[in-house]
Amino acid sequence: MAYTTINKSSDYFNTKLYTGTGSFPQSISGVGFQPDWVWIKRRNIAASHVLSDIIRGTTKTLYTDSTSAELTSNTYGWVSAFGSDGFSVNQSGSNGENVNASGSTYASWNWKANGAGSANTDGTISSTVSVNTTAGFSIVKWVGTGSNATIGHGLGVKPAMIITKPTSAVGSWYTYHKSLDATDFIKLNSTDATADNATIWNDTEPTTSVFTTGTAFDSGRTFIAYCFADVTGYSKFGSYTGNGSSSSGTFIYTGFKPAWVLVKRTNASGNNWQMHDIKRTQYAQPINHRIAPNVDLVEQTGDTLGFDFVSNGFRPNNNNADYNGSGSTYIYMAFGQSIVGTNNIPATAR
């Protein structure tokens, strides 16, 4: 049996850095595939995160640092096209600073689903789903009823993490993570700790075909969900407990060398989500260029702000409470850079 069905992780997830030109539209190439979910963040100046996906379509923007409803063709910029090797950005008026300000540096994180999506009737509410079962990723759109309901996700396996947002109205980014179980939820747009609320997931674990929503998913509102599953050698979702060491934090085994990691402290409020990737540090250790999805802050760097990425996992290199507080609990989401495929032969990660 092969270690993983994915020969090259960058065929399904890739970080692409670029510099703004101030000229619109700008085409960003070199992603390596047509991205179906694009997440953009201006690095050198504070600006909102820009999220676009193939199901909602071009011009439609959500911000992870905001509870705002979906914006259309706003002056701060949007993704205007999904191309075979990347995407284009555009703007109206004279701004566009969130996606293409002249001379500004940007990071984009790109995931491959399966195009515009199709109807899914597995749940009590019909959904539109774009799914890549090989990579364990789907994008799901549906209209809420305000009652307990089930939604088809298309993965064919139980999701490990589900990130949801109402698009037609103000609302939080309710997030499910397998390490918290379905009695609890956490918000991607907040520093809050986990909370127990049956109106979110109806205290019901997702299955191989559906996830359950509670009465908090209001009637008539349109919602989007980004669903993820563990894929051996490519993606991993889990939790760890910090040890408080300033030099050798808790080791987290993933089975691959990470390319991108998202972490959140769950047992206390006041700590931002933390996002790190190998591209922004140009593969050098430590992986200490951090971006916080829940705020519009400039990218921060420092020796006590991140991880060491190793061949089979990652380790906090500090005792910062955002990463490694003694006795504190954390959830994580990680994607790999190693190439280990159907021949069972691992390649050396860069």
Image (cartoon, helix red, strand yellow):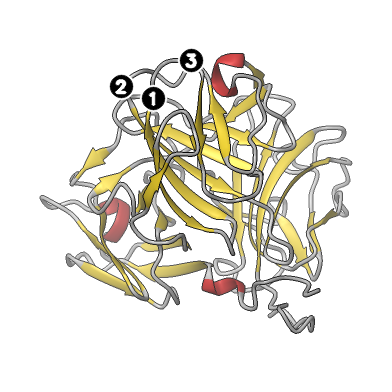
For the residue pair 22 and 178, the one nearer the viewer reads as 178
Mark 1 residue type: Gly
Q: Earlier in the sequence, mark 3 or mark 2?
A: 3
Q: For the residues labelled 1 and 3, say whether their Cβ atoms are less than 8 Å apart.
A: no
Residue type pointed to by label 2: Gly
Residue 313 horizontal/vertical position (percent): 79, 61
- Name the secondary structure under disc 2: loop
| Quarter-of-image position of residue 64 | top left
* Residue shown at the point (61%, 56%) measured from the top left: 276
Residue indicated by mark 3: 215
Comes first in the chain, label 1 or label 3: 1
The image quadrant of residue 258 is bottom right
Q: Nearer the viewer, residue 218 or 333?
A: 218
State whether residue 229 appears in this view.
yes
Q: Residue 271's x, y, as percent?
A: 64, 33
Q: What residue type is disc 3 on?
A: Thr
Q: Residue furthest left?
A: 93
- Asked if disc 2 and disc 1 are in contact, CB closer than 8 Å, the reply is yes
In the rendered structure, the answer to whether residue 131 lies left or right of residue 144 reads right
Q: Position of residue 120 (x, y in %)?
A: 43, 44
Give the residue at x 75% y 83%.
Answer: 348
Horizontal and vertical percent position of residue 232: 74, 63
Residue count near mark 3 (Cα–Cα under 10 Å), binned few <14, some 14–19, many ≥20: some
Image quarter of the C terminus: bottom right
Mark 2 and mark 1: Cα distance apart in space: 6 Å
Numbered disc 3: secondary structure: loop
Q: Earlier in the sequence, mark 2 or mark 1?
A: 1
For the question of whether residue 189 can be seen, the reply is no
Q: Which mark is residue 144?
A: 1
Residue that numbered label 2 is attached to: 220
